[in-house]
Image (cartoon, coloured by chain):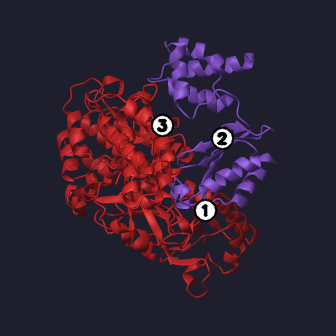
């Protein structure tokens, strides 16, 4: 009997040698005359266990990890393929049944329901795990009812701005135009985030389905995925999935014989962080420098090539299929306050157990850092965490009990952003982190507005003086003044939010700036 | 030079009718040739009804595009926060020292061009580097040495 062995193709798994492990398992099986079929699945997101190899058994999949090439022979010696007996002869890398691993079992995976389970580019796999049920339901509804379902689910933009997705769609639906567009913002540039990448590499069809539903809902016939150039594996997976979806009639001139057209194309970004800002992204898609536009007009009214355009993040769009499949109430049941549903949280930086945790809003930072993250990777105390990417605030230990909720974070002058959490141990120098925030802004500024273009460079210079201990009190006041100008005078979030990491570092860790209190 | 021109012309013909053609065209040129030669700006500008200044403006705006031939391999080291929290600064210093180059420079034997990058999406396995199109996670100085040695072999 052929035994199915799952070895991830996700780029983080590949970064830990998954390709070599797959080759070693294939050749060892051949050598020993064992009949196996290797499936290159997505990653379950337990990244510290990559390369995580799973074997199909009657009881479910059994996992081993982290597997290195040098472990392969011993796995065969322990008869790991005959995993029904795994409890009899456990290997030191045996993790038991995958679904029973507590880290995974406690999660509430809605958007990530299939991630790690299926072969990402197999349409058959996608369909056998509830794929395209949302689209089929959407085709039975009026455009207004699709939009209403998304609005009622409470889904808010997962890119960081948290604007209600349904409201955005409603604006585009209400615009009269011969051409409208759906643009997926896949320029995931925030440090500490990788959930978009995981969706695109490990379940690309769910994004395609979400964009198709969005197209039908607002009357757009063309979609673009603006994908960052740092994600070559996502590009391959998306293009392969788009080709099979088109061939099977899920994309094209006549989506599932409904008479509705929806075409989809991936466009590669070119390494500019600012192009994650929606208007700059649109400029880039039009073939221009990614310079931020003034708003109004809103992209929903005058977006790509001047036409009404929905611009949504990958996770927002990839969450639409389950909402249309299971209903608005099903999704809205999860969460707290005005933050409905689940958030795919990314545990990153100095943590023992980094990876993807999808949970309903409401879990605290502390639970994530210790119960899931397992504390710091270096074993030292966690001194600070940055939530929400390079424009997010640094939080000290005293704020670790904050619940993950958009409004709770606003109350402590922080942001949830795209759900990335980067932990730092007690060796971090917060004055250096503040300097880096200004430096990053200077490198990535589009140059259109003065507070961001000039302010970021002046910020680096002033922080350098503080680090050198020159006129500390005076220069701290200057940084606060400059931050005020950037906060209130910048055109977009790049200049407008750089003060978040800078001021939070100063307020919570004044000792690193040579002052006793903020 | 003539061969290069023919190659660029073919790419221009293939891309010029796409909406928003400039970025896809620049990507195609860089994918095929390794960089975007400044000598191609005139042809690109003419085909897309742009000024040479506009083409130059776009090429120079984006970190990804380069106008000179890089080394045989491109090594990118992540400088973003998550990698910093796991010691990427020491890794950067190590790379610069053993390659004897700074960022945006190519080793004397033309083997490796060193570039900074701001996030590779491998933040649960920091520090991360990318060699050509492959990402590597939890990279130690010794790991980097063997990657460099493999690339140079």
- Mark nearest the camera among 2 and 1 is 2
Query: CB of mark 3 within 8 Å of CB of mark 1?
Result: no
Q: Residues within 10 Å of mark 1 (few under 14, many from 20)?
A: some
User: Which quadrant of the figure has residue B67?
Assistant: top right
Q: Which chain is represented by purple in the image?
A: B
Q: Is residue A168 above or below residue A372?
A: above
What quarter of the picture does the N terminus of chain B occupy? top right
Q: Residue at x 40, y 35 (%)?
A: A452
Instruction: Label 2, secondary structure: give it.
Output: loop
Residue holding disc 1: A38
Q: Residue at x 42, y 28 (%)?
A: A291
- Mark nearest the camera among 3 and 1 is 3
Q: Which chain letter matches label 2?
A: B
Q: Residue at x 53, y 45 (%)?
A: B118
Q: Which chain is represented by red in the image?
A: A
User: Which quadrant of the figure has residue B91?
Assistant: bottom right
Task: Classify residue A233 as left or right of residue A364.
Answer: right
On the same chain, marks 3 and 1? The answer is yes
- Mark nearest the camera among 2 and 3 is 3
Residue A489 rendering spot, x and y as whole percentages: 31, 35
Mark 3 or 1 closer to N-term?
1
């Amino acid at each position: 009997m052929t035994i199915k062995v799952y070895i991830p193709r996700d780029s983080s798994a590949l970064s830990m040698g998954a390709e070599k492990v797959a080759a070693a398992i294939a050749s060892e099986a051949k050598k020993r005359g064992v009949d196996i079929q290797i499936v290159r699945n997505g990653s379950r997101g337990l990244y510290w266990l990559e390369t995580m190899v799973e074997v199909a058994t009657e009881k479910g999949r059994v996992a081993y990890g982290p597997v290195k090439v040098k472990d392969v022979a011993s796995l065969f010696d322990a008869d790991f393929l005959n995993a029904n007996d795994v409890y009899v002869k456990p290997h030191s890398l045996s993790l038991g049944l995958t679904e029973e691993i507590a880290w995974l079992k406690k999660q509430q995976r809605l958007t990530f329901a299939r991630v790690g389970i299926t072969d990402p580019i197999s349409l058959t796999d996608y369909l056998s795990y509830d794929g395209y049920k949302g689209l089929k339901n959407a085709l039975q509804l009026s455009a207004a009812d699709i939009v209403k379902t998304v609005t009622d689910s409470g889904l808010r933009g997962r890119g960081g701005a948290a604007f209600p997705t349904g409201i955005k769609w409603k604006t585009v639906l209400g615009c009269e135009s011969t051409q409208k567009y759906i643009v997926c913002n896949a320029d995931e540039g925030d440090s500490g985030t990788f959930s978009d990448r995981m969706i695109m590499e490990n379940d690309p069809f769910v994004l395609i389905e979400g964009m198709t539903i969005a197209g039908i809902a607002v009357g757009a016939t063309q979609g673009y995925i603006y994908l960052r150039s740092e994600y070559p594996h996502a590009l391959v997976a998306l293009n392969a999935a788009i080709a099979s979806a088109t061939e099977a009639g899920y994309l094209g001139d006549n989506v599932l014989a409904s008479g509705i057209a929806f075409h989809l194309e991936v466009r590669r970004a070119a390494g500019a962080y600012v192009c994650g800002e929606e208007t700059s992204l649109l400029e880039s898609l039009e073939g221009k420098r990614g310079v931020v536009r003034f708003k109004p007009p809103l992209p929903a009214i005058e977006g790509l090539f001047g036409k009404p355009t929905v611009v949504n993040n990958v996770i927002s769009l990839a969450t639409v299929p389950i909402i249309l499949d299971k209903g608005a109430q099903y999704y809205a049941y999860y969460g707290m306050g005005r933050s409905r549903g689940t958030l795919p949280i990314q545990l990153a930086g100095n943590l023992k157990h980094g990876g993807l945790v999808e949970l309903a809003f409401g879990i605290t930072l502390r639970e994530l850092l210790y119960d899931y993250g397992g504390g710091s990777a270096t074993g030292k105390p966690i001194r600070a965490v940055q939530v929400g990417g390079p424009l997010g605030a640094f939080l000290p230990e005293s704020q670790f009990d904050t619940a993950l909720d958009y409004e709770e974070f606003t109350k402590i002058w922080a942001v949830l952003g795209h759900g990335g959490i980067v932990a730092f141990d007690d060796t971090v120098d917060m004055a250096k982190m503040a300097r880096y925030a200004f430096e990053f802004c200077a490198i990535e500024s589009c140059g259109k507005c003065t507070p961001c273009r000039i302010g970021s460079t002046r910020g680096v210079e002033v922080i350098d003086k503080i680090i050198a201990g020159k006129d500390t009190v005076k220069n701290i006041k200057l940084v606060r003044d400059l931050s005020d100008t950037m906060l209130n005078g910048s055109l977009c979030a790049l200049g407008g939010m750089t003060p978040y990491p800078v001021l939070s570092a100063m307020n919570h860790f004044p000792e690193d700036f040579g002052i006793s209190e903020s | 030079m003539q061969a290069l021109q023919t190659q660029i012309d073919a790419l221009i013909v293939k891309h010029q009718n796409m909406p928003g053609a400039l970025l896809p065209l620049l990507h195609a040129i860089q994918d095929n040739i390794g960089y975007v030669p400044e000598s191609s700006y005139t042809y690109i500008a003419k085909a897309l009804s742009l000024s040479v200044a506009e083409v130059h403006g776009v090429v120079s705006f984006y970190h990804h595009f380069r106008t000179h031939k890089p080394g045989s391999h491109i090594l990118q080291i992540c400088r973003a926060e998550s990698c910093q929290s796991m010691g990427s600064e020491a890794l950067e210093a190590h790379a610069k020292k053993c390659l004897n180059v700074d960022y945006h420079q190519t080793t004397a034997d033309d083997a490796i061009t060193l570039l900074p990058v701001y996030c590779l999406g491998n933040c649960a396995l920091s520090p991360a580097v990318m060699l050509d199109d492959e990402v590597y996670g939890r990279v130690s100085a010794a790991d980097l040495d063997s990657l460099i040695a493999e690339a140079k072999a």
